[in-house]
Image (cartoon, rainbow, N blue to C red):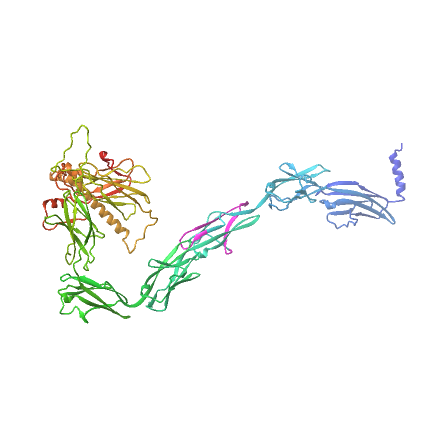
Amino acid sequence: MLQIRDILWGFLYIACAAAIQVQVTPTHREISVGESKFFLCEVVGDAKDIDWFAPNGEKILPNNPNVQVNRNDETTSTLTIYHADVDDAGIYKCVARSGDKEAQATVQVKIFQKITFKNVPSPQEFNEGDDADIICDVVGSPVPFILWKHKGVRIQSNKDVRYNVMDNGHLLIRGIKKTDEGAYNCEARVMETGEINFKMINVVVNVLPTIRARQSEVNATADMGVSILLACDADGFPEPAVTWAYNNVILESGDKYSLNDDGSELVIKDVIKVDEGDYTCIARNKAGEMSQEVSLNVFVQAKITYMNNQTATEFDDEVTLTCEASGDPTPSISWSFQNRMFSEGEQSHDRNIVVRSHARVSSLLLKNVDFTYAGQYLCTASNSIGQDNQPVYLEVRYAPKILGVVAVYTWEGNPANISCEVEAHPGASVTWFRDGLQVPSVNTTNVKIYSKQSNSYLEVSPESQSDFGSYNCTATNAMGTESKEFLLIQAEVPSSPEIQQVEPFSSSAVVEFDEPDSFGGVPIIKYLVEWRLDGHGWTGKEYDATEDLTRITIVGLTPDTIYEVKMSAVNGKGESESSAAVKFKTGPIRLSFTPSSEAPPLIVTTSMALKGEPSAPKLEAMVQNQGNALKVNWIKQDDGGSPIKHYLVRYKAKHVSDWKPEIRMPHSSEYVVLGGLDWNTEYEVRVVAVNQKGKSEPGILSFRTATEPTTMPGASGSGLSTGAIVGILIVVFFALLVAVDVTCYFLNKCGLLMCIAVNFCGKAGPGAKSKDMEEGKANFTKDESKEPIVEVRTEEEPTQNQEGVGPAEPNETTPLTEPEKKTKDDVKTEANNTAVEVKTVPNEAPQTNGNESKA
């Protein structure tokens, strides 16, 4: 039975006889890239030519190496594709021809390519702020679809406009940030085949350095051997490298500069003025570089660079001293001469001294040159950094000028020096003349010449009236000659002093007098005061003359008695005539007692010694050199008929209520020194005299201390060196130790000498002083009030007559010199005159007397 297929082939055979038919097997095929495949073209019918055409329509020639065509027989031809590439994909056509007959068939070739990452670098670096194009080049067939992931999350452009997946599959991040840094997943997918592949790309974001100078401006002082630190801090990613540049030159560590490990700190050694300027701190990394300038200001201490000494002749019109200085800031220049300062402008009313300054130069113009202009001028240049002083010298040549006291007084047999003081430059020679003849001559033995530096002394020992008169001093140098007459005058005895008044007390009197009208040409040496009872011989005492001595106290007088007193003055030539005698009467003894209703009436007879309390002493004060110490002197008045036992001193600042601890002074004391007082404070002092009957009314004195000084005066002259001062202090210290030890030995039987005497010599120390001898001493101690301690220094004082019998002890303001004939009582009186000095030391106080705490 015939099948349908056989029928169909029969129809086909019949048709072929009439036409050509072509069939390509297979009709389509997928080829993987790199594979090789062939295709068979079968022709039904008588075909003369069988050709293959590429997808681009061009006929495939036999010599094509990748795509070859081979005709197998009369009816078949083979197309072979070797190592297929994506470019080989497309529709290939097989065409058969026979005469005018033509038939064709096609085959579709699809080239399948696996996902391949061709250019996917990692890491990829970008600068912060740039538009980052993250490269991910993928090939595949069919063309793969690319998606991106960051930190496991898919990047979607519609949610963040900063991200964009471009047509070529790259990821574009606009204005990339440091936070965008990290791993990105480039994932390729082929929808047709379900193929998927990915690459991880590490994205690094470099950050441009930021830089900050620790100090934008640094100040330094030149020429001081100092080192200056310039520093800047840099940040960025990667860590930037730091360098320094000065005048566009990169600095390196060496003798002048030193850099730390990371370069952030630059040390400039031994800074000088040329180091001043702008230093650039540069920070570099992959993202770029940044710089910051640091200004170094170098200041220079004022320094004098030029001075000129000058020489002039007296009466020249003018001379100029010049001083030039350097420094930064520009220094100001001033001048000084002796204790006088000069600055810009005219410096004297006569316009003879003018200072002119310009920039760093100052000139001191001296007009109408005088010899007093000669000497050392000091130029001072100063700025905010410091100052410099340099001396400049002006030498003035001038003729001799003679100074000195013209009149000199003396007397026969008393040598006198006539001083001829010569100022001259250059130095002058000095010659003495008498009546036109040079002295001394060979015939004169009572005239001698002594020279010392610029002074010439003519010593004349007058032997007769002819030696008095005029002497000529002549000085000569290259500039000229000067002469001056000096007079040697016969001295006379002074005129007599004049007693103004006598203020009597019961046992003493104060004599007030005026100095003599004429001193006789020479100073008063002493005064002689004489007094007597009516009809008795004169008793006298000599008092050394001191400045402003106008009061003298005589003591030891009998109460209620008439005396007369006279005075004379004594100089080197002799004693003046006595002044007119002045009479006075001493006061009676004041009787002091408290009547009692039970006591019997008191009967006073002329034989009774009437005694009472003393009168208040008179006070005088003198501020000491230090300004916060005071010397208080007192003058004993009426002693009440019995000797003064001691004085009680109290003082306090007026603005406080509490008195300082009471000070007890011996009877022979005449003053007390109160030290360690508050500055600029008003004080009140009270002094009470005490005898056997009781206390006087207080003598009261008020005074104010000086204002505390703010600066210490500068020492003049060369002064002692520090070593010399230390040496002197050490010597004084050891001398004090020896003095204290000797004092302890004789007073208290203790100390180093006592130890030697007892242990080595077997001798005991001197006996202790009697109780009466110690009674007059002031005791000292410290108390918790931290008040000044009062130190009393006095000589030994005699034992007082407990009954008050005997003559009253004198108390004068000056040492007493007795005439040759003195009474026994006068000698005793002299021995009792002692000097007492009280000093106060901060934080300590004298011992108080409980029984005499109130004046």
Q: Position of residue 420 (x, y in %)?
A: 23, 64
Q: Is residue 762 within the magenta segment?
A: no
Q: Is residue 247 within the magenta segment?
A: yes
Q: Residue at x 15, y 32 (%)?
A: 602
User: If the image is split into quadrants, where does the C terminus sit?
Assistant: top left
Q: Is residue 321 visible?
A: no
Q: Position of residue 282 (x, y in %)?
A: 52, 50
Q: Is residue 530 visible?
A: yes
Q: Image quarter for residue 603?
A: top left
**Nearer to me, 79 or 568:** 568
Residue 836 lies left or right of residue 247; in this view the side is left
Residue 236 lies left or right of residue 462; in this view the side is right
- Tell me the magenta residue range: 219-248
Q: Main secondary structure of the magenta part?
A: strand
Q: Residue at x 74, y 50 (%)?
A: 64
User: If the image is split into quadrants, where does the N terminus sit?
Assistant: top right
